[in-house]
Every structure is written in C-alpha cells, then in structure tokens.
Amino acid sequence: MKKISIALIGIGKIARDQHLPAIAADPRFDLVACASRNAVVDGVRNYPTLEALLEAEPSVEAVSLCAPPIPRFQQARAALAAGKHVMLEKPPGACLSEVRALDEMAYATGKTIFTSWHSRHALGVEAARTWLATQDIRHVHVRWKEDVRRWHPGQAWIWEPGGLGVFDPGINALSIVTQILPREVALVSSTLSIPANKQMPIAADLELTDTTGVKMRVEFDWRHGPEELWEIEVRTADGALLLSQGGNRLQIDERDVALGLVHEYPALYSRWHDLILRGERDVDARPLSLVADAFLLGKREIVEAFEE
Ligand code: NAP
C-alpha cells in the first residue's frame, strides 16, 4: 500500500512525546518534513515555518498540527488552502468560530480535517461508553486535577487568551464525557478561579446536566499534587463506573475491566488514516463548546497570583 507522506508542525512537548513515536510506528505514514521555529527533527527535512515547508514540499499530502491553539488556526488555513489533509491537536481551535471556518474550508477543498481528541482513545473509554449505553445514569462526578508546574513548565501561552488555562487538560475530561454519555450535556453554571496576575483560570468548578436532568459536577484544579487525579465517576441505578488514570483504567463496581492495547496516539493516527482513505471529515467541537460556555456563564473569582 502506498504510504501517505506527512509533515509535522510545531515540534514541542506533545510532538516529541507522542506524535513522533506514533508516526514512526505506523507503516502507513511516511514522515518527510517538519516545521518549527526553533526545533529540528533528525532524519527529515526541516523548515522554520509551515509556509516554507508547503512551498518546498508540494508532494506532502497531510499535515499534523501540534502548535498551541492560537498559531494553529493560521497554520490550518494555510495547509487546507494548499490542498493538504489536516489533523488538529486538541483543542481544535482557540475559539469555536475557527473550527467552523476550517470545516467549511475542508469541505470546499474535499480534504480530510480531523479534530483529534486523544483522551477519547484512552484504553477504557470505549468499554465505558458501551456499558453506559444501557444504564440509568444518576450522577456524574469529574475530578481532573494536576500540578501545573509539573505538566506545563514554562508554557506562557497557556495563561494567555486562547490558552485555556486549566481547561487545557480539563477539555480532555470533557472530550471523554461527551463520548461516553448517551445523551447531550449542557452547562448549568461555572466558577472560574483566575490568578490575579493571569488571564486564564487555574481552577474551575462546573455544573452540567443532560437532557433528562442528571446532575454532573466537574472539578478542574491545577494546584494539586504530587499525584495527578484524572477521574470520571458515574453512578447508575445498578452500580458505579470509575474511569481513572485519564481514561486508561476502568472499574465497574470496583472490579477492573480488561482493556485493549492500542494506545491513544497510535489510535489517533489510525483514525486519521481511515478518514483520509475514505475521504471523510471528523469535526467534533462539543468539548470546546462546553469550555466556551464555561467562560460565557462563568462567575469569576480572583485568587492568589501564580508564580512559576
Ligand atoms: P509546547 O511544547 O509549548 O508547544 C509546541 C510547539 O509549538 C513549541 O515548541 C513551538 O515550537 C511551537 N509554537 C509555540 N508557540 C508558537 C507560535 N506562536 N507560533 C508558531 N509556533 C509556536 O506545547 P505542547 O505541550 O506540545 O502543546 C501543544 C498542543 O498540544 C496544545 O494544544 C496542547 O493542548 C496539546 N497537547 C499537549 C499535551 C501535553 O502533554 N503537553 C498533551 C496532549 C495535547 P517552535 O518554537 O520550535 O516553533
């Protein structure tokens, strides 16, 4: 089978930790070039910008974008305008209108756009979705708490408008919630704790509901440590489900459920490959929409300044 020639853009933490190993392990992709202002990847051709790469590498078919959300929109537009398939890291945009605009562009060019949500491919998520499909759900409690100094050292962009603050990891929980619950969820209220010297929240407390009135509490906090807590607990009429370790461990009624072996980023690249072969788009902005709603309805509390 002919390999899809691919370029990776924005070589930082997630590109090195996950994208490069996942692409290297997937024989259906051929990484030929990278673009990053300050970084290079061994064994491929490197460019300082995506625009320079597009100019020099007309045969690249697909572009995977790993820069933070604000620069990513311009990059996605340039890649789609050049007729490339595009995969977007999460969140798919700094705001919802960007995602709609990119989807329209992809539709017009006939190219694949994939708003990837890596946490939806955590090992326990599909089994959780299957179990919950037939359950009478009574309550949902999300606790997504970690130490920002450990997980986001030196990432100034994350505190700026468009960086999402604590919603940067929190949106992973929302991507799972919107995948495993059988009905749509809506935001009821939100409280945002914003450090006196920052633009974005360090913690957030949300209340959500579904179409039947099930109550859901969501707690995001970056002032937590040393062990991160990435858990979603769902109580039903018949039992309790706990997804922990970011979705990679599933317990039903306190018993571990045996899970598959394909990890998040290899699964993302498989999905993107399938979409490209089928000529389809996969654009789901629901997790970002809940974040936008949390800002729209957010009661703001100014908290202690944050110094890294
Ligand atoms: P990062 O390391 O801070 O940024 C990635 C790279 O993007 C940087 O090294 C930088 O490379 C480039 N970049 C930064 N600002 C730019 C700008 N203004 N214009 C052009 N390029 C710019 O961030 P990250 O942790 O990899 O996160 C990137 C995205 O992946 C985010 O949306 C994040 O939510 C998502 N993500 C992160 C993780 C994680 O564990 N870190 C996990 C899953 C998803 P150059 O300076 O070389 O251009």
Image (cartoon, rainbow, N blue to C red):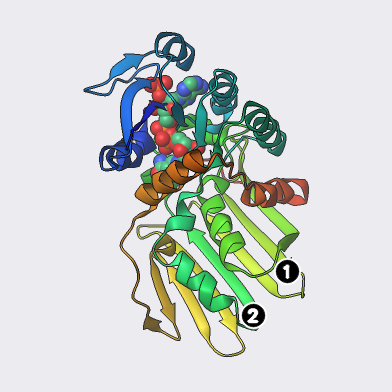
Q: Residues within 10 Å of mark 1 (few under 14, many from 20)?
A: some
Q: Who's the residue at 45% across and 62% down the image? A: 230
Q: Earlier in the sequence, mark 1 or mark 2?
A: 2
Quarter containing ligand 1? top left
Q: Who's the residue at 27% across and 40% down the image? A: 27
Marking on residue 137: 2
Marking on residue 76: none
Distance Cα–Cα, label 1 vs label 2:
10 Å
Between 161 and 10, the one lying in front of the other is 10
Q: Who's the residue at 46% across and 17% down the image? A: 50
Q: Is residue 307 visible?
A: no
**Under tag 2, what secondary structure?**
strand
In the displayed structure image, the side of residue 276 where residue 133 appears, left or right: right
* Dot 1 amino acid type: Asp
Contact (CB < 8 A) between labels 1 and 2? yes
**Under tag 1, what secondary structure?**
strand
Q: Which residue is mark 1?
A: 210
Q: Is residue 112 visible?
A: yes
Q: Where in the figure is residue 52, as x and y percent of width and height?
A: 44, 10
